[in-house]
Amino acid sequence: MTTSMKDVIALSKRRGFIFQSSEIYGGLNGFWDYGPLGVELKRNLKNAWWRDMVSSHNELVCAEGAPQEFAMTGIDASIVMHPQVWKCSGHYDLFFDYMVDCRESKKRYRHDQVRGRWVEAKGRRIFVTTVAEADDEAEAVLRRALKFFNVRASHAEELKWIGGFQSLADAGDPASVLGPDASEVGTLTEPREFNLMFKTNVGALSADDNTAYLRPETAQGIFVNFKNVLNSLRIRIPFGIAQIGKSFRNEITPRNYTFRSREFEQMEIEFFCHPGESEMWYRYWRDRRVQWYRDLGLSSGKLRLREHAREELSHYSNGTADIEYAFPFLPEGEFGELEGIAHRGDFDLRSHMEGKLAPGTRPLQLEVDEHGKPKYRGSGKDLSYRDEITGEKFIPHVIEPSAGADRAALAFLCDAFHQDQAPDDSGKMEPRIVLRLHPRLAPVKAAILPLVKKGGMPEIARKIYAALKKQCNVFYDEKDSIGRRYRRQDEIGTPYCITIDSDTLSDGTVTLRDRDSLQQRRIPVERCDEELQRLLT
Ligand code: ATP
């Protein structure tokens, strides 16, 4: 059975993974809150990333597939940074999407998200548009076309559809376009640039000279700290600096649940290396990152690595690959970006040394104003690197694996969602929802369940619970029949259930139930701790 987004969203709300932000006030589009289970899932994901990329990395040995040994470290930079950072990085001038406005409905849309179909009826041909999600767009367009032509649903055959869905950008003839919320054609404006950075003011006065921005990516915090890290750790290239933190983008139309939010978390690495070795490091990080998702159980059929074609690359990039997942809200055969791995050359460090570099120049040159002066001045600080052993001085190249924690959490949630059958208390097979989350990601690692609330079982269960709670997030539950308790745990992805029954009283063993295989085996009470640790790592 294919997973529907509606089912994932319903479970997620019902069991406390994700809530709409400020829901009691009607919500705020593009902002989301993680509930009691969601916070555990997302934190487990971030911890797994930090551990696998940074804290458990051994710089003394050559990691599998790596060209040589390398070091990894981390920082936590501020969200609001000096405004010049964004001028030099290019975000101030170039970080925009195209939007269109509707003169009739006064609504604003992201140009590339408006899709539609040509239709003809009563001697007129129009392009009917919608911004509905893929599952709903056919119905939305039909409904709007019927209304526009004043045709009853029972006479829908009067509408002659010409071709399939296409984007507004490809439709042509603006005068025939029926906007997504308009009742007349020709109300959409030409596309215009819309900068995605959120503005704020630093200090008490609201004036242009204290305008600052909420960071749209965590990466720049790493670049501007490159020298600080280098000097404080006395680290040698190649090495990577990692950071996890909030980023903000004023997306024109946030959509697809948490996939495109206005506030989200990124997990980024900037890996600094010798220019002559950067191609090798690019390939290493691209392959290593896709393997990370696989190791945490993301199904390979829905996960893919897509290398960008030359014409798709940013002006400074020597290579980019996206790790993509076939989210259930996308049409069949389409994938959404989870992470981008980019070979950024020396673009970032040079920008912060010299100033904003001109797009399209190769080799990159400083962008100048009409007086021939730098358009945006860099810091003037020397961000080059001198190799103490070889004496060589160079500006390091950067490989950037840039992942989104929210998109990854959503992908793992969608991928884990399954509906199958499991026996109820009488052994009869009943439908169940089960989240097959990797044990490292599961919000609750094990549930401790006394079979009945008497006969000394709760006392033993509480002891086991107290011991296990010290090492991981376990859950104690004595309410309802055992079958219903199993079902509740399956739904939230708890990989193991430990049940205390009458045999526990006589032989000191408990059952350990596996969420996926449904197999139960008995283990001694005193081995619960050790066994769980073994299974979870
Ligand atoms: P898209 O093309 O989908 O807007 P992007 O290419 O702009 O994404 P990057 O700038 O490469 O994204 O950001 C790196 C990662 O940050 C993305 O792969 C994604 O996981 C995450 N990310 C970016 N924008 C958003 C957003 N609006 N909501 C949630 N996550 C995001």
Image: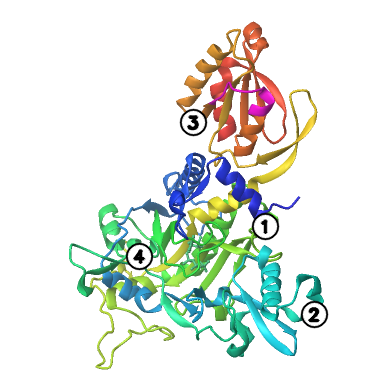
Circle 4: residue type? Gln
Q: Which comes sooner in the sequence, label 1 or label 2? A: 2
Tell which of 87 and 72 is nearer to you: 87
Q: State the SS at label 4.
A: helix
Q: Which comes sooner in the sequence, label 3 or label 4? A: 4
State the scheme by which the image is colored: rainbow
Residue hosting label 2:
158
Asked if residue 370 is positioned above or below residue 161 in the image, the reply reads below
As measured in the structure, the alpha-carbon distance from the residue carrying label 1 to the one carrying label 2 is 39 Å
Residue 58 x, y percent position in the rendering: 44, 46
Q: Quadrant of residue 454?
A: top right
Tell which of 452 and 107 is nearer to you: 107
Residue 29 x, y percent position in the rendering: 47, 60
Q: Are marks 4 and 2 in contact (CB under 8 Å)?
A: no
Residue 366 x, y percent position in the rendering: 32, 84
Q: State the SS at label 3.
A: loop
Circle 1: residue type? Lys
Residue hosting label 1:
302
Left or right of 315, for residue 130 = right
Q: Which comes sooner in the sequence, label 3 or label 2? A: 2
Q: Foreground mark, 3 or 2? A: 2
Q: State the SS at label 2.
A: helix
Q: Are marks 1 and 2 in contact (CB under 8 Å)?
A: no
Magenta region, residue range? 476-485
Q: Which comes sooner in the sequence, label 4 or label 2? A: 2
Residue hosting label 4:
220
Q: Which mark is residue 472?
A: 3
Left or right of 440, for residue 5 = right
Q: Quadrant of the C terminus?
A: top right
As measured in the structure, the alpha-carbon distance from the residue carrying label 4 to the one carrying label 1 is 31 Å
Can you see residue 388? no
Q: Which comes sooner in the sequence, label 4 or label 1? A: 4
